[in-house]
Image (tube, rainbow, N blue to C red):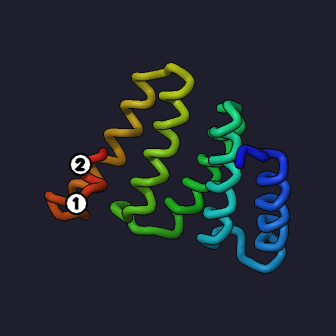
Amino acid sequence: MGDYSKALEFHEKSLKIREKALPPNHSSLATSYNNIGGVYDDMGDYSKALEFYEKSHKIKEKALPPNHPSLAISYNNIGLVYNNMGDYSKALEFYEKSHKIYEKTLPPNHPSLATS
């Protein structure tokens, strides 16, 4: 609906609940950080989007195996922000990391691999 302030309000409420109830490297915290990053990305606040996408990614790196598809999504999200910022070489770096994981983990005809 484009009501970014309302979206942030509810994502931040969710994050506060999760921070109180869960250990600091729980995957649900990564989800909250990712969701907040997505709102900032949609708002065009790319530095805040990167901040939250990177927080999400750090948790995923600790909690997941190195070729987990969630890491590929995380790399892709970070690449998307750099792309939106016009930093295409940095975007490509993250898109390639995402693609490598997809190549290792997905069948050759998977739509996510094609999109990547």
- x, y percentage for residue 59? 59, 61
Measured as percent of width and height from the top left, residue 98 is found at: 36, 48
**How far apart are the alpha carbons under marks 2 and 1?**
7 Å
Residue in view at x 73 percent, y 77 percent:
22
- The numbered disc on residue 114 is 2
| Residue 31 against residue 47 in the figure, above or below | below
Mark 1 crowd level (few <14, some 14–19, many ≥20, 10 Å Cα): few
> In the displayed image of the protein, which residue is found farthest to the front?
1
Image point (30%, 46%), residue name: 115
Figure check: 79 above or below 89: below
Q: Position of residue 84 (x, y in %)?
A: 53, 27
77 relative to 46 in the view: left or right: left
Q: Please rate how many residues cluster around mark 2, counting C-alpha atoms within 10 Å: few if below 14, some from 14 to 19, many from 20.
A: few
In the orientation shown, which residue stands out farthest toward the bottom?
Answer: 21
In the rendered image, which residue does mark 1 sit on?
Answer: 110
The outermost residue toward the left is 108
Please name the amino acid that badge 1 sits on.
His
Q: Where is residue 93 in the image (x, y as percent from the top left)?
A: 38, 33
Q: In which quarter of the image is residue 18?
A: bottom right
Q: Do the residues labelled 2 and 1 touch (CB within 8 Å)?
A: yes
Residue at 61% x, 56% y: name it: 56
Q: Is residue 33 left or right of residue 104?
A: right
Q: Which mark is residue 56?
A: none
Q: In terms of secondary structure, where does tag 1 sit?
A: loop
Which residue is drawn at the image coordinates 44% and 54% (left, top)? 73
Q: Is 60 rendered above or below residue 54? A: below
Q: Is residue 13 above or below residue 114?
A: below
Amino acid under disc 2 = Ala
SS of the residue under disc 2: helix
In the image shown, does 26 or 38 lie closer to the viewer?
Answer: 38
